[in-house]
Every structure is written in C-alpha cells, then in structure tokens.
Image (cartoon, rainbow, N blue to C red):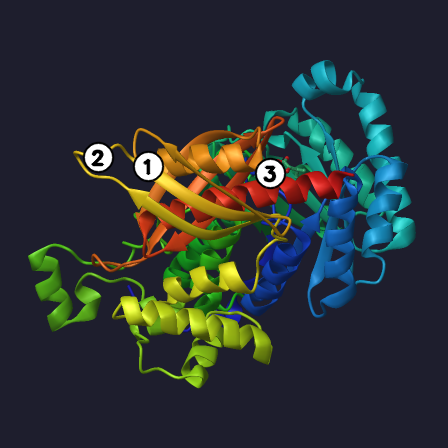
C-alpha cells in the first residue's frame, strides 16, 4: 500500500479548476461576485494551477467577476472562456488582461452531430474558424487553450487535424472534452493515445481532458487519460457542473496521492485545503454533499461497524487508506463552546479558510456564536460557517426576518406569525398551513408578494444531537431561473423561514443585477 521513492521522477499534472465556470452551470449554483472572489481566494490556497473564473461575454456580471479575480489574484493563471469568435475573445481579454499569466480558453465543437445540428457548418469551416479564433487570441497572450467540444464523439482524424492547425496558430493547451460524459475509460485512453500519436506537433502543447459525469465515470476517465499521457485535467470542487457534473478534484487528487505506485504524475494541490474548499462550495452554492461521497462526504471517514471500530482502535491503517488530516479534517473535531473567547473563534475562522474578519464583523459573529453557545453545548465548524454565511457574507437583504412565532402539534391548527422588513419597512402577518413551515412560507409569500415557486425543500442537522442547528435548503424557480436559499438556526421553523427569505433575497439580487 505504501509508496516508494518514486516522487522525484514524477511529472507535474496541471489542475485546471472550473468550479467558477462549468461548476456554476449546475442548476441553482449561481454565485455572486463576492462569493466567487472568496472561492477564488480559497482555490489559490488549494494551489490549483489555473482558475477558470467565468465566461466574460455571457453577462456583465460574469465579466465583472472574471475581471475582479484577474485584477486581484496573483500566482495563479486565470482563464476566461470564449466561443471561437472575435467578439467573445475580445471581451474575454478585456476581463483578463491585468491578470497574472492570463489564459484565453476558446472552444468549438468538432463532432459531426454538433456540426450538423448546432453549428450548421462543414468541417472545413470549423477548421478555419478554430484557426482564426486561436490566431486572434494569440495576439493577446501566448497562453491560449483550445477545446474541441464533444471531442469523444468526433472523428479522431478530424480532431487531430484541428489540433495540429491550432497549435500552429498559437494554442499552447489542447483540451479533449468528454462533453456528454459518454466515454468509457479504456476507450477514452485509446482516444488520447491516438491523438498523441497522430497530431504531429502535439509535443509543442499540453494535452488536457475535461470529463462530464453523466455515467459516473468522470474521475475514472480522467485517470485513464492521465495514464495515456495527458498532463492537464479540468476539475471542479465536489464534482459540481453542468448536468451530472465534472471530474471531482478531491477524488482525482487523492487517488493520485494515495496510489503513487500507480501514477506517473503529481500535483501541487495542498490536500489539507480540500475539506475547507468543499465546505465553502457547498455553503455558497447550497449544493449539499451526499454523506457517502468519497473524500468529502460526512461519512467518508466514519467507521460504524463494531469490527471496524475495533480494528481502528488497534491500528488506524486496518480500515483507513487515507489520513483524515491529509484532507483537512484534523481540527474538525475540536469543539468550541460557551467558554471559548473571541481569539479562539478568530483562529478557527482562519483555519476554515476564511479571511480575517474586521473588528466589527468579528463582534457580530462572536455575539451570534455566544448566543448559540448558550443554547447548544458544542459549536462545530459547520455551526460557525452557518453564522458566517448569515452575518458576514450575505447578499444584500431586500427582505429581513425580524421575528417568528409558531404553533403546532397534533391537536392544534398549525399557525405561524411573522414580522419581516421589506427594504427596511416593517410588515407582519399570520397564516395557517398544513404544518408550521407551510404556514410560515405562505405568510412570507403573502407579505413579500413573491412569484417564486418552491421546487424543493430539504432539512438536515448541521451537527449531531437534539440541540443541533437545523440547516434548511430550498430551491426556488423565478422566471425560469433556479435559485438556492439556505438558512440555519436551532429552531427548525426559523431555519426554514431564513432559507426561504435567503432565496427570495437572491432572486431580488439577480433581478437587480440584470437591470
Ligand atoms: O463540456 C465541455 O465541452 C465544456 C467546454 C467548454 C470545455 O465545458
Ligand atoms: Zn463542460
């Protein structure tokens, strides 16, 4: 199981993180500028090599996010996505140009299915457009990536022809995406070997893959491609992304680290930052991680069976192939409580990967922490993150919850009375429902006049015990757009009301940004 001294002969794998671009394409995972910047800062701590910060032509908001990240982060390449068009590339470059080693990532489909039905172009036209796009991008920077969208369903000789031509035009990274998540590992490795053998100038560029997880094979396919010779992999934290998502960074990196005997590559990733990064992505996007998810799921290092627990007590390696500390779980069990001071709280916030708080923010977080500690014995990392999301990192509050009282039980008519602020103006009311949460939502909907539709509602307990904070996640639909809302509170009805209002605030914020 242990590795030997092979580390020195390893080649470096480039980790291209697309959580902020493909990851944000997950339904409901929209992030605002402040959230994207905070996540980008965390990706720097994680030491990914490239951050794909967005698709600048997609909207003014996307442009601003990419520019903000490129202008302010150092020591990491920032990429912006652009279709193979002068307008897209110019817009991407405008957003990226002040960055540290900025990368223009341009893409064009190469499969006959896309050519016929989507692009309505011939292969000759696609070849010509790809070359002219790359040539245009290369006038701005020598760091140009070209992706052959739907490469795995394309004629490989055509992909090789396009790759050879775009390398001549200035592309330095060539990406071979499995856009539809269709490939099988052996087949994918064969395709990579074919491209390496039949693209004459491929040695002048880095070959990359970008795998989708429609058949649950994204990590397996990426690993097969690495064995076949690719040296860049495109990944997202927690595997989020379009449809079933992308290759999960934490899984890929930990496979390589845990089985160095099987891999010729190594990465720069600071694996101890994996858990804070995963938490940050799930708290920002509202996409909770399934408990049995490898590496970052709540059960990934939990040993339930008596035989396993006995083995673990005798020797950890009997049932553990990774050390939880290596993925940043070491301090997760150190518990803060009502006697902990401001300093301990500030330290814990820093160890969770958040920037130091201003005195004013720390004061607010600390008083919420004390308030919670009076009601709940042990305060865990997740509790602190829930308070941070509420107090320090919120989106602007169009709606604010002032107070809530609910009556329920098996003999009472469930009733909830609520007082809220709408742009600072107080409104109050009460309503009946099937249960107190239903009554709360109906009352909030009436008081805010919202047209958002509730699609999904989930409650989980942030930590164990009956005194745990409840965490509620809702998905709303507003004019065809999916919005996630979250809220946490020891009182589950209050947590639900907070989540609903957080979703409504996000919807209001998105509308404001569109104007
Ligand atoms: O899935 C895909 O093909 C993409 C490209 C833009 C790289 O996301
Ligand atoms: Zn993709």
Q: Earlier in the sequence, mark 1 or mark 3?
A: 3
Q: Which residue is mark 1?
A: 415
Numbered label tally: 3
Q: Quadrant of residue 74?
A: bottom right
Residue 20 position in % (x across, y down): 62, 49
> Label 1, label 3: how many angstroms apart (C-alpha)?
38 Å
Does label 3 or label 2 sit earlier along the sequence? 3
**Around disc 1, counting alpha carbons within 10 Å, would you say few (fewer than 14), some (14 to 19), or many (20 or more)?**
many
Are the residues tagged 2 and 1 within 8 Å (C-beta)? yes
Residue 230 shows up from this direction: no
* Mark sitting on residue 412: 2
Where residue 192 sits: x, y (%)? 58, 39
Quadrant field for ligand 2: top right
Mark 3 highlights which residue?
Answer: 25
Frontmost of labels 3 and 2 is: 2
Q: Residue at x 75, y 39 (%)?
A: 514
Residue at 87% in and 49% down: 138
The correct choice, above or below, for 168 with respect to 465 in the image is: above
Q: Quadrant of residue 272?
A: bottom left
Marks 3 and 2, how far apart in space?
Answer: 44 Å
Label 3, residues with CA under 10 Å away: few <14, some 14-19, many ≥20: some
């Amino acid at each position: 199981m242990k590795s030997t001294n092979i580390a020195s002969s390893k080649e470096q794998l480039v980790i291209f993180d697309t959580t902020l671009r493909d990851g944000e394409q997950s339904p409901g995972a929209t992030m605002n500028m402040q959230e994207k910047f905070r996540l980008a800062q965390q990706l720097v701590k994680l030491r990914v090599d490239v951050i794909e910060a967005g698709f600048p032509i997609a909207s003014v908001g996307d442009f601003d996010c990419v520019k903000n990240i490129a202008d302010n982060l150092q020591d990491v390449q920032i990429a912006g996505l652009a279709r193979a068009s002068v307008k897209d590339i110019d817009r991407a470059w405008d957003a990226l140009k002040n960055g540290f080693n900025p990368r223009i990532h341009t893409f064009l489909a190469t499969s006959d299915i896309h050519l016929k039905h989507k692009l309505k172009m011939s292969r000759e036209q696609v070849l010509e457009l790809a070359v002219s796009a790359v040539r245009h991008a290369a006038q701005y920077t020598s760091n140009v990536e070209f992706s052959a969208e739907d490469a795995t369903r394309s004629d490989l000789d055509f992909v090789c022809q396009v790759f050879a031509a775009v390398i001549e035009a200035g592309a330095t990274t060539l990406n071979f995406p499995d856009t539809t998540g269709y490939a099988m590992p052996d087949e994918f490795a064969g395709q990579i070997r074919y491209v390496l053998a039949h693209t004459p100038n491929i040695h002048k560029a880095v070959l990359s893959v970008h795998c989708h997880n429609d058949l649950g094979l994204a990590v397996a396919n990426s690993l097969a491609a690495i064995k076949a010779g690719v040296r860049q992999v495109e990944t997202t934290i927690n595997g989020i992304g379009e449809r079933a998502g992308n290759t999960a960074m934490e899984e890929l990196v930990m496979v390589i680290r845990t089985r160095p005997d099987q891999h010729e590559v190594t990465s720069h990733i600071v694996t101890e930052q994996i858990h804070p990064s995963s938490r940050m992505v799930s708290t920002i996007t509202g996409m909770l991680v399934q408990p049995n998810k490898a590496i970052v799921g709540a059960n990934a290092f939990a040993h339930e069976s008596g035989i396993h627990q006995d083995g673990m007590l005798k020797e950890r390696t009997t049932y553990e192939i990774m050390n939880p500390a290596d993925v940043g779980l070491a301090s997760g069990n150190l518990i803060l409580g009502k006697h902990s001071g401001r300093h301990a709280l500030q330290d814990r916030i820093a160890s969770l990967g958040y920037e130091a708080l201003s005195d004013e923010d720390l004061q607010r977080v600390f008083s919420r922490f004390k308030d919670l500690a009076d009601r709940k014995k042990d305060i865990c990392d997740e509790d602190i993150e829930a308070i941070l999301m509420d107090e320090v990192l919120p989106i602007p509050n169009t709606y604010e919850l002032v107070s809530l009282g609910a009556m329920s039980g098996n003999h009472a008519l469930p009733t909830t009375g609520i007082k809220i602020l709408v742009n600072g103006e107080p409104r109050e009311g009460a309503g009946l429902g099937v249960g107190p949460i239903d009554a709360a939502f109906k009352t909030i909907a009436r008081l805010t006049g919202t047209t958002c539709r509730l699609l999904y509602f989930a409650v989980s307990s942030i930590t164990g015990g009956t005194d745990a904070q409840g965490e509620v996640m809702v998905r709303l639909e507003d004019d065809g757009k999916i919005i996630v809302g979250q809220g946490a509170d020891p009182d589950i009805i209050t947590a639900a009301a907070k989540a609903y209002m957080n979703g409504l605030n996000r919807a209001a914020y998105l509308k404001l940004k569109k104007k």
